[in-house]
Image (tube, rainbow, N blue to C red):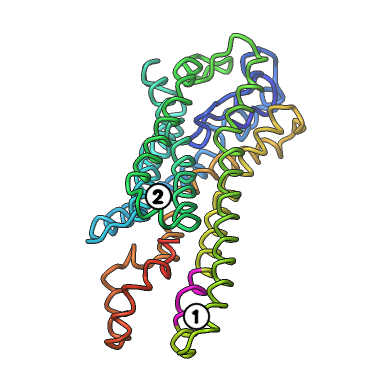
Amino acid sequence: MPASLTKGSPSSSGTTQMLASSSPASCTETVTLAEVLQGEEWGSQYHSFKTEQLVTLWVLFVFTIVGNAIVLFSTWRRKRKSRMTFFVTQLAITDSLTGLVNILTDIIWRFTGDFMAPDLVCRVVRYLQVVLLYASTYVLVSLSIDRYHAIVYPMKFLQGEKQAKVLIGIAWSLSFLFSIPTLIIFGKRKLSNGEVQCWALWPDDSYWTPYMTIVAFLVYFIPLTIISIIYGIVIRTIWIKSKAHEMVISNCSDGKLCTSYNRGLISKAKIKAIKYSIVIILAFICCWSPYFLFDILDNFSILPDTSERFYASVIIQNLPALNSAINPLIYCVFSRSICFPCREQRLQDSRMTCRERTERHEMQILSKPEFI
């Protein structure tokens, strides 16, 4: 998505640039600064810093596939599958497909330099890449909505088991729908520098800026706003309920038991929910913000035509793929029972008394972050 360094020097359309791969200026035939300098590092990003980019992509690919495979295997082994387990599974599936369809194809593409497959393959690959780009974001939004109902409307949440599947169905449906323009926009073409790429084909340069602005809002800005608002309400609700619960506990006849219950249940749930929510939101922001902010500034011609801009685009284009690689790490850190269910269970059982084991069943739904 980041535009080319100068007019006539097409930009990369790498793994994290599935939505679009060249600026409108790439259709021109003007002589560019890159062509004048003839430097090895200039030109298409498929031929620039080839070794460095391949190493980076391979690392992202391995972490994405291995990490999400561990999560999928662990959730598959769970005997009691909660709604949160269902969403974690969906996110892991989406991230795994992102690694296979987006990162792996980008590795092959950067290795060959040119796009070797037919035009139909170009359009289909681009379409699937964009579908996964939307899906990875919308599944996260669906998870946020489900957590909202779990905390704000707990009684309705328990009665609506089909809601999770409905939310995921809507997320994927919107992803397939919003990606349809990709089948028309992209095609195989020969660029002015002799490269054959799967590139955006525009009848007029003026189409580019509004298209990319709409995509940026659909993929990033609107979902981020929804997620932030939802988790803000969730955190506020937990805080209010914990305060109300403390007032009830203060009037309890068995103060010791009530205080213990309060500390072990409400306070722990509140703290874990806050940490979990903040990390999920920050990971999403850190991986996507530089990419879309750079793209918006670049498409509105705010960034200067310098070598630093080109180098920045090479680095920033790989950040969104990082989100698929670090998601499994986040889930494992905040929910060890997902990645290490047997070990976690043995450790808990060995430290519990008979009474604590009895109380655990009542407390675990709210005390574990995956149910927040």
Residue 161: mark in rendering: none
**Magenta part of the protein: which range?**
261-269
Q: Are marks 2 and 1 in contact (CB under 8 Å)?
A: no
Image coords of residue 9 (percent x, y): 63, 23
Q: Residues within 10 Å of mark 2 (few under 14, many from 20)?
A: many
Residue placed most toward the observer, 223 or 121: 223
Q: Is residue 76 left or right of residue 322?
A: left
Q: Quadrant of the C terminus?
A: bottom left
Task: Decide whether residue 14 is among the magenta residues.
Answer: no
Residue 83 pos. (x, y %): 35, 53
Q: Nearer the viewer, residue 46 or 228?
A: 228
**Residue identifier under label 2:** 64
The residue tagged 1 is 263
Q: Amino acid at mark 2?
A: Thr
Q: Looking at the picture, tell me which residue is in the foreground, 64 or 179.
A: 179
Position of 26 relative to 217 (above/below): above
Q: Position of residue 272 (x, y in %)?
A: 50, 68
How many residues crowd mark 1 within 10 Å: few (<14), some (14–19), many (20+)? few
Q: Secondary structure at mark 2?
A: helix
Helix or strand or loop: what does disc 1 sit on?
A: helix
| Left or right side of 97 for 276 | right
Q: Residue at x 59, y 38 (%)?
A: 222
268 part of magenta stretch: yes
Q: On the image, which quarter does residue 112 sit in?
A: top left
Give the answer, above or below, for where 157 lies relative to 5. Answer: below
- Of 235 and 287, the residue lying toward us: 235
Main secondary structure found in the magenta portion: helix
Quadrant showing the N terminus:
top right
Percent across and percent down for residue 94 are 38, 42
